[in-house]
Image (spheres, coloured by chain):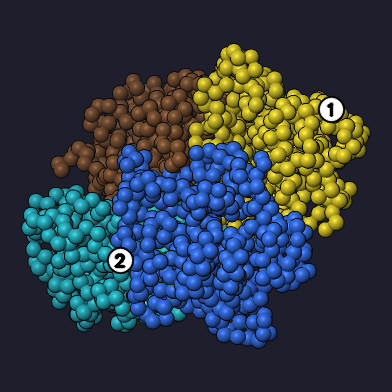
Chain colours: A brown, B blue, C cyan, D yellow
Amino acid sequence: MAATPLRIGMIGYGFMGRAHSNAYRKVGNFFQLDRTPVLQAACARDAAKIKSFADQWGYASIETDWRKLVERKDIDAIDICTPNNTHKEIALAAAANGKMILCEKPLSMDGPEGRVMVEAIEKAKVPNMVWYNYRRVPAVTLAKNLIDEGKLGRIFHYRAKFLQDWTISPDLPQGGNGLWRLDVGAAGSGVTGDLLAHCIDTAIWLNGDIDSVCAMTETFVKERQHNLTGKKEKVGIDDACAFLCRFANGSLATFESTRYARGHKAQYVFEINGENASIAWDLHDLHRLQYFDYKDESKIRGWHNVHVSDGDHPYIGNWWVPGLQIGYEHSFVHQVADFIEGVSKGKPAQPDFRDALRTQFVCDAVLKSAREGTWEKVERV
Amino acid sequence: MAATPLRIGMIGYGFMGRAHSNAYRKVGNFFQLDRTPVLQAACARDAAKIKSFADQWGYASIETDWRKLVERKDIDAIDICTPNNTHKEIALAAAANGKMILCEKPLSMDGPEGRVMVEAIEKAKVPNMVWYNYRRVPAVTLAKNLIDEGKLGRIFHYRAKFLQDWTISPDLPQGGNGLWRLDVGAAGSGVTGDLLAHCIDTAIWLNGDIDSVCAMTETFVKERQHNLTGKKEKVGIDDACAFLCRFANGSLATFESTRYARGHKAQYVFEINGENASIAWDLHDLHRLQYFDYKDESKIRGWHNVHVSDGDHPYIGNWWVPGLQIGYEHSFVHQVADFIEGVSKGKPAQPDFRDALRTQFVCDAVLKSAREGTWEKVERV
Amino acid sequence: MAATPLRIGMIGYGFMGRAHSNAYRKVGNFFQLDRTPVLQAACARDAAKIKSFADQWGYASIETDWRKLVERKDIDAIDICTPNNTHKEIALAAAANGKMILCEKPLSMDGPEGRVMVEAIEKAKVPNMVWYNYRRVPAVTLAKNLIDEGKLGRIFHYRAKFLQDWTISPDLPQGGNGLWRLDVGAAGSGVTGDLLAHCIDTAIWLNGDIDSVCAMTETFVKERQHNLTGKKEKVGIDDACAFLCRFANGSLATFESTRYARGHKAQYVFEINGENASIAWDLHDLHRLQYFDYKDESKIRGWHNVHVSDGDHPYIGNWWVPGLQIGYEHSFVHQVADFIEGVSKGKPAQPDFRDALRTQFVCDAVLKSAREGTWEKVERV
Amino acid sequence: MAATPLRIGMIGYGFMGRAHSNAYRKVGNFFQLDRTPVLQAACARDAAKIKSFADQWGYASIETDWRKLVERKDIDAIDICTPNNTHKEIALAAAANGKMILCEKPLSMDGPEGRVMVEAIEKAKVPNMVWYNYRRVPAVTLAKNLIDEGKLGRIFHYRAKFLQDWTISPDLPQGGNGLWRLDVGAAGSGVTGDLLAHCIDTAIWLNGDIDSVCAMTETFVKERQHNLTGKKEKVGIDDACAFLCRFANGSLATFESTRYARGHKAQYVFEINGENASIAWDLHDLHRLQYFDYKDESKIRGWHNVHVSDGDHPYIGNWWVPGLQIGYEHSFVHQVADFIEGVSKGKPAQPDFRDALRTQFVCDAVLKSAREGTWEKVERV
């Protein structure tokens, strides 16, 4: 009731700025926490745009220079929702000012940069988290719980795909607001850092460390109009990436992501096959988990189509009544709730910067493998 | 190996004539039986057509008069694949000649006619069966086994639909070959006798007797060209029929059939909800059974999507290897196998004429209810 | 930006109190409106409970007597989230005080009561709406748009089911908080008013008026402990209800609802079959619409599985990016947005009290038909 | 009608011996052909077993030495259903005797062996075919037709999986009847030659030549009891294999097969993503094709779930009525029909030995890549 405020300084106002703001606003209505997020300040270079965003969401103030924001005394936590190439500098400054940090994924442009960030933040001893939100989709959390209970037994196979189709048109430009993900300078990579990073984060969480990878990438559209230069420029990102890999636990895996899979808007799918049971999930129907258990009586053995909407499913008891589904945005609410609880208990919610760095090194190995046509070992964190 | 022949006399050469012939030809390759069907004679009024059919299927001889066929000494069993309005006369003659009878469904034009047939055939003591083939789809047989094991507990609800869309065009004529099902004179009724009869047969098998019904019917296209008269004639059949009903076991049910459900070619679906478990099936994916069991651990509770293609599923051990599906035609093979086994053991395979008569009386009550707008009790057999 | 406040007085704090509060809080973040809901006061008899609710949701004040609330000058709109037997009295008082009214469904205990409410509110000329929220699930709104475009052509069939399984245990009591829906005194009826009312509202919206119905109901568990009396009492509600009906447009329909369908938590399904196209929807996957169009090229004709998550789908442009699903709660946000827009434009958002009264008379006819075993005409509004 | 006999000499009596025999027996009932298969002789070393098989299927005679069979004057075609390590010797002898040859897949133990077979058979000028039956599943043939029509446009992605779970138990032995597929001496490889060969054949047919591959394999169970030696022996086959590849048309692909994917009996799945349209298919529901077309109106755009059971779908017009599904075995019937038609027209049905050799070289490259950890170019035929 008399919850202490947790004053948020938000940097950025795009898709993720909205998703996080919504989570901060809602979490207290549905979760009993001893800190309440307060939308203290929103920050971006464009004063008009950030003012409009702040009004829409109820931020109490604005800033146009993130350096000022991270120095403000009335801010407890900095939320970094800017393009990937700015994460490091902001995070280092926020850490230096003793702020908690919630950073959008991927953590950094590459592993070495991420390692610098991890060292800085651990030295500063500030609570930190990276927004790999899919861990908090209830069906995915349920998958984790089933694995931790040992229901699957020895794991043989892991496979994940993240398929989209929104960049097929060669007329789509690159760069600038909304399209910085196509600009290698801002994003660092294409689907690897944007989409496969999600798949890798989930995979490490569910199935442990990845030992080695072998990848291929492709850029189907070689040149696109660049919004920042106004000219046709070479496309530097990977449009598609697939890789084979071996996990430390001996299981084999395939990963694939593309933005050229006609018919799929955001199909993040994973499946994990164990000796005794298997699990599958699809973001397109995120409230369902497919579960197969060999221990079921043989004649009624089949994939259980679990509608993850019951009170004994993760997070669901805080929402509505059984059978009524929640959606994408709720994963962020859960992540805020877990972060706050972690802060309160002095036990950080995962993935923190260090966890996220593991994903970064897998991405590095993937991109190197694709360039060189070789199997690559993954650097351990 | 040294199986005694079971010499078949087939009357009719349409869709069902083909389906049964295929079953007779195949059953011995997949099932170990002590009688082997032999395609002894095929019969129809049109000599050229029946000759062509006999050649295609390997019938040893033909007849153009079914009265001759039923008197032939070299025929053991008569298979009646003719329009509904001819079943009685042929069945009575076949019984009088001591032939086994395999009769297409529905048994008769109505209950009273069916009762005459049952009495005649029981007096003649000849093995008899009615081709309600869906009982022998492995998934449906599995449903029956699960119910018989008591997995469902008290039954609360039964619902069945048989939806088609092939008569929506008003340009489709009625009557004659291939279209006698639209001609009330030949068929007796429309979807009630053609499609709901299947639903009712399965329902009685799975859920016991039906006590009372309340129905509505509709004929959407009021007149159609008649192939036999060459003129536009009033359509006498029901294009659609739906009814509420109460079973003797206290459960409630809804049934519906139509040939005006755009998008469904032959969607026969049923679902049964019990205190502890539920079952659902769809002819469009006939090799699957949906099964929900409340006794499953709560967090992984969901409908089991059972691919009924394993060796311990009904009939499947006689076919291929796990995971490889069989289709519609196999239900007829199973029915022949069960019939022959029943004959061998002196224990008739269901549904025999008496079983099929129960369905007939439900149809009668349905049609009367629709005419009169009242609830009707079902006459018991 | 400088949106006028719309000061809400909420009566009730249960499931719907939460759903509406969430909608009021969120709507301004996602929709550009010229009125902004303000959570002005929450009201319930139990002071401690309503205080706790108000704190959780940020209501500025509380009341323990709804009569006081409806008289407060600082309240613009009254939201009625109390049991059905209190709707009339509150609505009449609110109307008398010139308040806008947003009333939970069903509107009233029966048609005659509802007619009184309609008359009062229309006389008072206050904006009013009833929370039949499923109209605003984007897939359902899309269905409406497709029908209005004429894509389906002549309608032959409508079918709807609302299946739940939460009252199977005879140990579940009736009455009091959270269980008033099982108490006929508070609810008026069982599944008919609670669940079928939703199905009927959608059906009238999509398919027009219902002419006549024929129904059956059942109460499977005859006695339950009553939370208010502490004694076993007769159960007065209908546990299950199914009915046949005919629409004014000549189409046939079946409706069914039950709380004894093991395996279904909240499966509201409808399907509508037209001459040219068909549509189906399932609340369990509410972000999908199934659409079949006979005009598709024949060899690729099949049900389109539409993931209703694109910018050109209803309401979706206000949310996230394509492919990311929203959930149950968003239907309420849409309804608030439409209500406010209706108020601004002087064109009320549907369903208003008068629309909701049509559903009430269908329910009356259904319940009468079930009691008397007859077909009943539906009274027109 | 007066069809010339096509006298079959069958070698082998296992799963494939049965599947082919069934196809020969049925094809004439459903397809109008000018050659009729006649089951002339069945051959295997074990006289009792082949006698029993011949009786079950109606073969007119038996042989216990395949060399005698291939020399018989009353045999037109030899069907090779023996383990992979015997294909070459039998095929060469059959060709030398001028027999047509229908050979089980994979063609050979490896590419070089296959090349010898191709040269021999082409020199002998005998009609020949390899039983990659999945091309003739109607949904797969439909996929081919849609691609040939140009509906997909430029292809970006191909992915295929063939997942099974029947060898997870380490107690399963290797070698001998029914288990020769686990014995590297008889099979040549594990899932690569058995399952991926199917995937590769379909892929080449649908998407053209494969340029290069990069693979990994694993043998999860290292030792198994050997049925031929009676001792625990090292397992020489690949239990699982996954590979990345690039097609000549510039598209990227992933392939995977395993017998350790708990929950999948025979899940052969492929998906192909084109610029304008995408296609997906699953052997577990082989009568369905999923089709997405970007040209559909945006608001009803979604995957078409096509029930491939209509008269204008490939092969279906020869079977039952719309909506009634056929199964796995029918693919073999179609293949026989196409083979006979090819023979009649002097235009061989694909895949012939030369086509099948392309698959063999892909398998060779896959296995080499897995051994050496490198990308491998595929040798062209």
Q: Are marks 2 and 1 in contact (CB under 8 Å)?
A: no
Task: Tell me: residue D200, above or below residue B130.
Answer: above
- Marks 2 and 1 sit apart, C-alpha to C-alpha, by 73 Å
Q: Which mark is residue D377?
A: none
Question: Observer-nearest residue: D95 or A95?
Answer: D95
Residue D276 position within the rendered picture, expressed as x and y whole percent measured from the top left: 65, 53
Which residue in the structure is indicated by mark 2?
A: C241
Give me the chain letter of mark 2: C
Question: Observer-nearest residue: D201 or A229?
Answer: D201
Q: Quadrant of residue C210?
A: bottom left
**Residue in the image at 39% along x and 41% along y:** A139
Which residue in the structure is indicated by mark 1?
A: D67
Residue D190 position within the rendered picture, expressed as x and y whole percent measured from the top left: 64, 26
User: What kind of residue is marked 1?
Assistant: Arg
Question: Observer-nearest residue: C309 or D100?
Answer: D100
Co-location on one chain, circles 2 and 1: no
